[in-house]
């Protein structure tokens, strides 16, 4: 039997940009699944995504293109495309051949993030990603890497309970809620214990509530005791081509309600300063923790079926769920 091979580009919604990147009539160029795309924001505030290369005569719309009203304009001959990818007018103010239309890339804006749906056949999405409002928190901070890896392999680590001890040096990892799988969603909850100083505590106990939505978005709620800290994390892998991905991670922290739980003297600090200090430490540890996986990700092969042992976690359930995003099996 031919061994299963991970698809390089999986079906799903992927975060390509932040709204803050759109300035004036500027257009953005981003890569998704080996294809260059142009993103633009119209005068009315809608976000459009079109193929980077104009079908008229091949110019790259992201190299000199600009926003004109509700369209993006190709810099070569002035052909204009709306947010549906339709070429609505030529540069000569004459009707354009419909064959020049760009592919219609579905877009979903959630808070500051612009998600784009990828399907190799151009099929429409059957679901949309969601990110909840997190309430009274610090602003998000972000970090990213370019990795020789795969989006499906990245998220497998979230259910691989065994690796937390050896890669992340957790002293204990345990499941709280079993894996719940429904359509494009995966949910679970697990806890960890780790000895060592963290924000003044000699040990850390934390619970993580995980919500995957396809291969491009994980929303994680972390609750850390005994300091009564609560943070929210986004993990956003995106295939960019040549067997590489961009892995973007972000986090924010619920503003501290009970400074005394951190340290008796914490009440002496201005709350804004205290939140900034603690969140900076938390985010630094988050980046460090995710970065510990990098060497493994970039140098491993995908073994399927794996020869699992007791303590590995629900790897096979995850893999069966993830195969729905394989274009060859969907």
Image: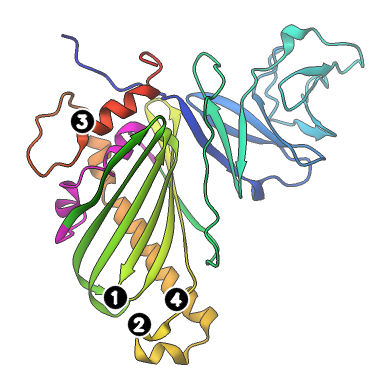
Q: Residue at x 57, y 32 (%)?
A: 116
Q: Which mark is residue 226?
A: 1
Q: Is residue 2 above or below residue 178?
A: above
Horizontally, residue 75 falls left or right of residue 204, namely right
Q: Which mark is residue 261?
A: 2
Tell me which segment is drawn in magenta: 146-172
Horizontally, residue 212 falls left or right of residue 62, namely left
Q: Please identify, in this view, whether the residue under mark 4 or under mark 1 is nearer the observer.
A: 1
Local crowd at mark 3 within 10 Å, few (<14), some, or many (≥20)? some
From the image, which quarter does the N terminus lie in?
A: top left
Q: Residue at x 19, y 47 (%)?
A: 161
Q: Is residue 150 visible?
A: no
Q: Which residue is under mark 3? A: 316
Q: Please identify, in this view, whether the residue under mark 2 or under mark 4 is nearer the observer.
A: 2
Q: Which mark is residue 277?
A: 4
Q: Decide: marks 2, 1 in contact (CB < 8 A)?
A: yes
Tell which circle, 4 or 1, labels the residue nearer the N-terminal end.
1
């Amino acid at each position: 039997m031919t061994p299963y091979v991970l698809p390089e580009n999986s079906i799903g919604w992927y975060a390509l940009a932040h709204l803050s990147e759109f300035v004036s009539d500027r257009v953005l160029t981003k890569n998704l699944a080996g294809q260059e795309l142009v993103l633009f924001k119209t005068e009315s505030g809608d976000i459009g995504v079109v193929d980077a290369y104009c079908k008229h005569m091949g110019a790259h719309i992201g190299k000199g293109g600009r926003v004109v009203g509700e369209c993006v304009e190709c810099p070569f001959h002035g052909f204009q495309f709306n947010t549906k990818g339709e070429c609505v007018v030529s540069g000569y103010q004459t009707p354009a051949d419909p064959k020049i239309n760009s592919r219609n890339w579905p877009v979903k804006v959630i808070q500051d993030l612009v998600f784009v749906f990828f399907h190799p056949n151009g099929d429409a999405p059957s679901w949309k990603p969601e990110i909840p409002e997190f309430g009274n928190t610090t602003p998000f901070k972000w970090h990213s890497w370019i990795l020789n890896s795969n989006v499906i392999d990245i998220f497998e680590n979230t259910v691989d309970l065994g690796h937390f001890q050896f890669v992340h040096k957790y002293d204990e990892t345990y499941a709280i809620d079993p894996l719940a799988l429904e359509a494009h969603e995966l949910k679970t909850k697990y806890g960890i214990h780790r000895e060592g100083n963290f924000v003044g505590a000699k040990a850390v106990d934390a619970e993580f509530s995980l919500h995957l939505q396809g291969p491009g978005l994980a929303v994680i709620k972390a609750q850390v005791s005994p300091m009564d800290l609560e943070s929210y994390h986004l993990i956003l892998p995106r295939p960019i081509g040549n067997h590489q991905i961009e892995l973007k991670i972000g986090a924010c922290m619920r503003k501290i309600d009970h400074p005394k739980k951190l340290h008796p003297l914490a009440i002496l600090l201005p709350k804004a300063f205290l939140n900034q200090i603690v969140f900076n430490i938390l985010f630094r540890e988050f980046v460090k923790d995710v970065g510990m996986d990098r060497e493994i990700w970039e140098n491993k092969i995908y073994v399927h079926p794996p020869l699992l042992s007791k303590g590995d976690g629900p790897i096979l359930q995850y893999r069966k769920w993830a195969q729905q995003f394989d274009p060859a099996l969907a």
